Image (spheres, coloured by chain):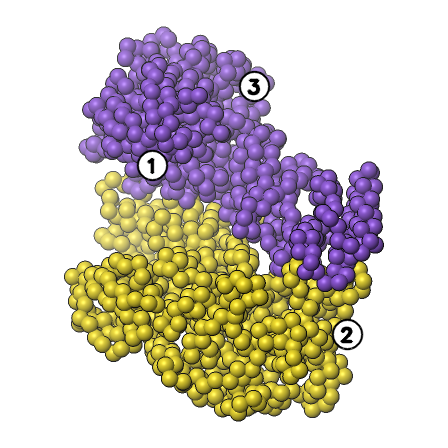
Chain colours: A yellow, B purple
Amino acid sequence: MLKPEHGRNRVVIEEVAPQVDAGRHAVRRIVGERVSVSAAIFADGHDELAAQILYRHRLERKWRTAAMKPCGNDLWNGFLVVDQLGAWRFTVMGWIDRFESWARDLRKRLAAANELAPGEMVLALRTGAVILERGAIRARGADAQKLKEAARSLEVLASRQTTPAEYPLSEEIHRMMAQYPDLTLATRYEQELPLWVDRERARFSTWYEMFPRSASPEPGRHGTFADVERQLPEIAAMGFDILYLPPIHPIGRAYRKGPNNAASAPPGAPGSPWAIGDAAAPDVRPDGKRCEKDCGGHKAIHSQLGTFDDFERLVSAAQAEGMEIALDIAFQCSPDHPWVREHPEWFTIRPDESIQYAENPPKKYQDIYPLNFETSDWRGLWDELYSVFEFWIERGVRVFRVDNPHTKALPFWEWCLDALGCKYPGTIFLSEAFTRPHLMYGLAKRGFTQSYTYFTWRNTKSELEEYLREITRPPVSEFFRPNFWPNTPDILHKALQEGGPPAFAQRVVLAGTLSASYGIYGPAYELAENQAAQPASGKSDSEEYLHSEKYEIRQRARSAPGSLVPLITALNRIRRANPALHSNDSLHFHGVDNPQLICYSKAAPNFDNLILTIVNLDAFHEQSGWTNLDLARLGLTSGEAYFAEDLLSGERYAWSGHRNYVVLRPGTKPAHILRLIRQQ
Amino acid sequence: MLKPEHGRNRVVIEEVAPQVDAGRHAVRRIVGERVSVSAAIFADGHDELAAQILYRHRLERKWRTAAMKPCGNDLWNGFLVVDQLGAWRFTVMGWIDRFESWARDLRKRLAAANELAPGEMVLALRTGAVILERGAIRARGADAQKLKEAARSLEVLASRQTTPAEYPLSEEIHRMMAQYPDLTLATRYEQELPLWVDRERARFSTWYEMFPRSASPEPGRHGTFADVERQLPEIAAMGFDILYLPPIHPIGRAYRKGPNNAASAPPGAPGSPWAIGDAAAPDVRPDGKRCEKDCGGHKAIHSQLGTFDDFERLVSAAQAEGMEIALDIAFQCSPDHPWVREHPEWFTIRPDESIQYAENPPKKYQDIYPLNFETSDWRGLWDELYSVFEFWIERGVRVFRVDNPHTKALPFWEWCLDALGCKYPGTIFLSEAFTRPHLMYGLAKRGFTQSYTYFTWRNTKSELEEYLREITRPPVSEFFRPNFWPNTPDILHKALQEGGPPAFAQRVVLAGTLSASYGIYGPAYELAENQAAQPASGKSDSEEYLHSEKYEIRQRARSAPGSLVPLITALNRIRRANPALHSNDSLHFHGVDNPQLICYSKAAPNFDNLILTIVNLDAFHEQSGWTNLDLARLGLTSGEAYFAEDLLSGERYAWSGHRNYVVLRPGTKPAHILRLIRQQ
């Protein structure tokens, strides 16, 4: 081992946090957030230390600094504020504070003046003068002058050969010396740690998924962007801020699926929007010209939905309603996709020269060709996929739901999402991966802003509590932002199938209060559609919808009698009005003596806003019980009386202490969403 | 972000363990040990993966490999064996196993042959043939031929256009394909992780500390190396394997301390061996010539102890008794040390040109000059300190106890211990740092083989259990090896002062059974010397010995009546005979329904050797209670009867289940050290 370059740097820095995989991936935060940075900082011996955070945005050359303070046991803490979107780096610097070490010893000497050796005080004062003079050289302007004067005053005291009556330097001198530290032998932590800053909606968002082709009010007519536009006020009134559309591209003809996923499609069947690509489609490019190349693929619009003008008008109209349009990016191709002809090398070729379709033997998905990320032209493939995002970003889209990202190579996502995020700050990517934990987390680490979760399959109290503890705390919460979906066009969980409207009410309240981001697929959700497909196999555990909208146009009015629109509207209003629900960091589960009731709180900083939610997990029976609240986590003291205002019902309860009675009834009162208010 | 070089490498590798601080420091193991390596390894999609460990010693150019196996949830595990001392590196490689993926799908196709599309089986067989042909190109000799034949057999099957009756390839073909993997697109973990391999004694050692100057049998005469040599058989008979001597160098004269740390020494006072250096000493160098430079310092022997020849004879004689001599390396200088004259730049100079002595105002240690690791000649200082170790290594010393390493710069230790460890494999360094946890652990991470601990100040059951759990489990156990000392010349704990011989008996049993390495300072320990100095301050919490041997010659016979020699001899015999006590990894605490009793087990692999220790923590009263043994951790089943053989008393108890009665009495039966034997 060679000697290091800087062998005199005695300070050691370890355990710098936050980190994801030792700096391999970025910690994710929100713009404007105060980011707490901690580290273990120590040195040999007994000198006083000082430390600071260094941080900068990728576009900045100069490091900004933020002071760190010791908080015991060699741990230090400080805060930085991220005021720009995108990529940041931070690190930590520590050094021996010679001035404060000297000052500490001088104070000890003054306190034990009668035990000093002859000349000891004189030497101590002269040592201090030297340190202050060196500080004066580093200082600027008037500060330099003041430090010089302080040095001189110590020299004067030394020359008197007596012990000063009191500590001779002012707080101002200490502040100045801290301002102009001697960093010659400072240690910098080995790594610069990455930090990625998103906009607020990355953390707090409310999604509504709908099929535009079902949006027509006229029975039997294929819906259009204009039809969606007409529904915008209704959707905005429910309190959603992201309107997510399944793929809007031309749909393949070869092996097109019929209703209920039938192997063959009857004439006129619309097919699945995820079977993307029809090179023969009457596709008109944004510039109005007929396309020569790459037509009918991921940069085209299914002609029955409308034109590019219609799409851009929809994007603008959504913005006017306070909403954003999210597109679905599904990197897979129907056999009719233009890439199949133009870039057969991007697919897997079988020994008979045919292209490999998707399969899980013996199941075949002949309407879908997966891309081969091991192609020798991977650079060309990556560029083209990147350009798909860019194409839609240039048309005003800033939110993408990415279909099955776990079947595309992770190095691609790492490159693509970083490049897009830097060029188009604030773009949001939702990962639709339902797979094993490492792979789901691996995608989040590689740049997905939000992720689908296992929420749909977490139904009991212990399942929910365990899962939420995992995803809302470090290390997972440093890089993974959950988005809870009680349903999707692919997933109608047994709990909803069997529980009907009461279960729908419970699950949406859970989603919207447990997770700062959630979404529903409507109008199936508002209408509590709970008829599952009976698969050919006869197995009854299907999570597919009967007459799934994936294969059929389904027109219905979301505000039919008994619809959940009022509940969802109230929930979203409560979410917006209560900052406690805008993040997950403060989530805490409280006791309640009934396994069918779940109880949890979220709090804004300093308990300025405090929401306690209690949900009945039983869709069939009234459940009641006594809470066992962890008062410290609510900022309350043990004997304290407080109000619990039910934001759903408007009722107000006078509560006190940790033990309070609750009763919830399926259908009429699925949950309490209580704002706790101290009686002051 | 630029595109990576290898964008096609789809496998992701994370969470590689063992690691210390993400590979910043080495994991420590013992030569011959089987090292378990684990990692999370996964890729997009559903392909089968394969993985291996790559590892090599620092002196090897070629990587060795060891296969890894999946163990669920994307976690993989494998083992490497370290067969050489010193620095190793390891990493992990993973890849898509195209052959096994194909084979899995073929098996599924065979199982559902009637659901296949026309031509599907033919294509599958031809695909397999292509994969086998490529494997044949990578294979060597006869294997290549066999793989070619296997490929041909699949082609033949394909040409028949029928479904094979059974899976067509042998296990041998699968083994061969695993032996010649296609690593073209393999992913290698970003880091090579360091692993440091020590010899067995680094993990399991039994230390005895004594002052050679007290070793003379003639009253009043200064002890010599020859006197120590005469005691070797007695010390070896007690079962110690490392004999550690405080500094053996010339002792400074300036500000020499008198008995009981008196500020001035009466004529003839021997002074503290840690006040190292006397340039005026009649020092004779190993070559017999009078030294010209650097005489009387860290490379010299205090003339009253003997000559270099005497020293080397002692080293050899110890070896003959199965022991090693450990020297104390204390990098500090008396004002008379040759470095003070030759290298004043290595010390801190005060404004009056004098050298700064050690101090903690108002306390002064004028007999000690600390080295200044911020000196501009730090390279010269490092070289000199390194050469001190090397000097003694060349004289046969392979074990060092390093005094106060926490007051020397950590970058120095990192460089010095690594350089010494590489040049002189198997050298053992014991860190004598009693300071804050981060600093103690920081020293261990930088290369100390063993470390003193807080054991001395952990006396109650909960204190002991909590502390042992911390230091015997990862992350700490990956780099920190505890060495438990119930006493040292600096530390006579209140528990010993007050508890007398019964406390000495309890604490030595705890040290020797809780920790694979322990040591005592004798003969003070055997004689249960428990008289503390009364400090001038009148505070009674002194841990200093009265008439501390640090400042006086203390001659006494360790086998006086009531001595603990028999107990210590038995303890060390038990330690040697029972492999369970040779490491700490298996330490497990069991319940016992009396807070004054502590109960714990250690087991050798496969429970081949199983030791259950129960110690009475009360030095004054008999204590009894019922155990609540965690039978699974003892390899026992709940109804099972077994023998508990007390290795201290020779008694044998017939026990069964988790609940058994124990009674221990101070003085006569301090502890049970039970070997558990299944009745088979």
- Of residue B671 and residue A624, the one placed in the foreground of this image is A624
* Circle 3 residue: B286
Residue B91 appears in the rendering: no
Q: Is residue A431 left or right of residue A466?
A: right
Q: Is tag 1's residue or tag 3's residue first in the polypeptide sequence?
A: 3
Asked if the residue under mark 1 is in contact with the one under mark 2, i.e. CB atoms within 8 Å, the reply is: no
Does label 1 lie on the same chain as label 2? no
Task: From the image, state whether disc 2 or disc 1 is nearer to you.
Answer: 2
Asked if the residue under mark 3 is in contact with the one under mark 1, i.e. CB atoms within 8 Å, the reply is: no
Which chain does the numbered disc 3 sit on? B
Label count reads 3
Q: Is residue B84 left or right of residue B598?
A: right
Disc number at residue B320? none
Q: CA distance from mark 2 to mark 3?
A: 84 Å
* Circle 2 residue: A342
Q: Height in image: A449 above or below B169?
A: below
- Of residue A246 and residue A619, the one placed in the foreground of this image is A619
- Of residue B278 and residue A517, the one placed in the foreground of this image is A517
Task: From the image, state whether disc 2 or disc 3 is nearer to you.
Answer: 2
Badge 3: few (under 14), some or many (20 or more) residues near its Cα, within 10 Å? some
